[in-house]
Amino acid sequence: MRNIRRLLLVLFAVVLAALTLFFVLENQQSVVLVFFGWTAPAVPVAALVLAALIAGLVVGPLLGACMRLRLYRRSN
């Protein structure tokens, strides 16, 4: 059972890596991001999407931990 679980985890990681690589290779068009008058240099669409994904993966758990800490302090 443990080996099957490990195999499924490795298979999932390989499929996820392959899908990410496919996404990056298919989205090489350059775009310019304009935000409140500030213009960023032209970068591929995939770079912006992956940067937003990584930022969300970092910020989401941090906000969740802050909320849990706040609730824990309030209950004590």
Image (cartoon, rainbow, N blue to C red):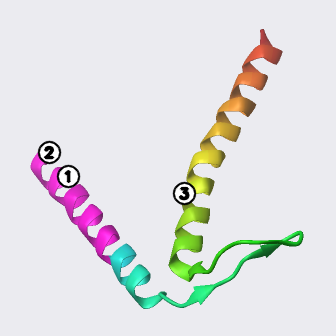
- Say whether marks 2 and 1 touch (CB < 8 Å): yes
CA separation, marks 3 and 1?
26 Å
Q: What residue occupies the far right of the structure in this picture?
A: 36
- Examine the rendered structure and indicate whether residue 64 appears above or below residue 15: above
- Examine the rendered structure and indicate whether residue 39 appears above or below residue 55: below
Q: What residue occupies the far top of the structure in this picture?
A: 76
Instruction: Tell me the residue that label 3 is attached to.
Output: 54
Instruction: Using the image, tell me which numbered label, if any, was put on residue 5.
Output: 1
Q: Callout 1: few (<14), some (14-19), or many (20+) C-alpha neighbours within 10 Å?
A: few
Residue 75 locus on image (x, y percent):
79, 15
Q: Quadrant of residue 66?
A: top right
Query: Is 9 on the left or on the right of 4, as rendered?
Result: right
Q: Amino acid at mark 3?
A: Ile
Q: Amino acid at mark 2?
A: Arg
Dot 1 lies on which element?
helix
**Can you tell which of label 3 and label 2 is closer to the viewer?**
3
Instruction: Tell me the residue that label 2 is attached to.
Output: 2
- Residue interval drawn in magenta: 1-18
CA separation, marks 2 and 1?
5 Å
Query: Is 41 on the left or on the right of 47, as rendered?
Result: right
| Picture residue at 54% right of the left edge, 81% below the top | 44
Residue 70 locus on image (x, y percent):
78, 24
Q: Nearer the viewer, residue 64 or 3?
A: 64
| Picture residue at 82% right of the left edge, 17% below the top | 74
| Picture residue at 59% right of the left edge, 72% below the top | 48
- Examine the rendered structure and indicate whether residue 60 appears above or below residue 29: above
Dot 3 lies on which element?
helix
As for residue 62 lying within the magenta part, the answer is: no
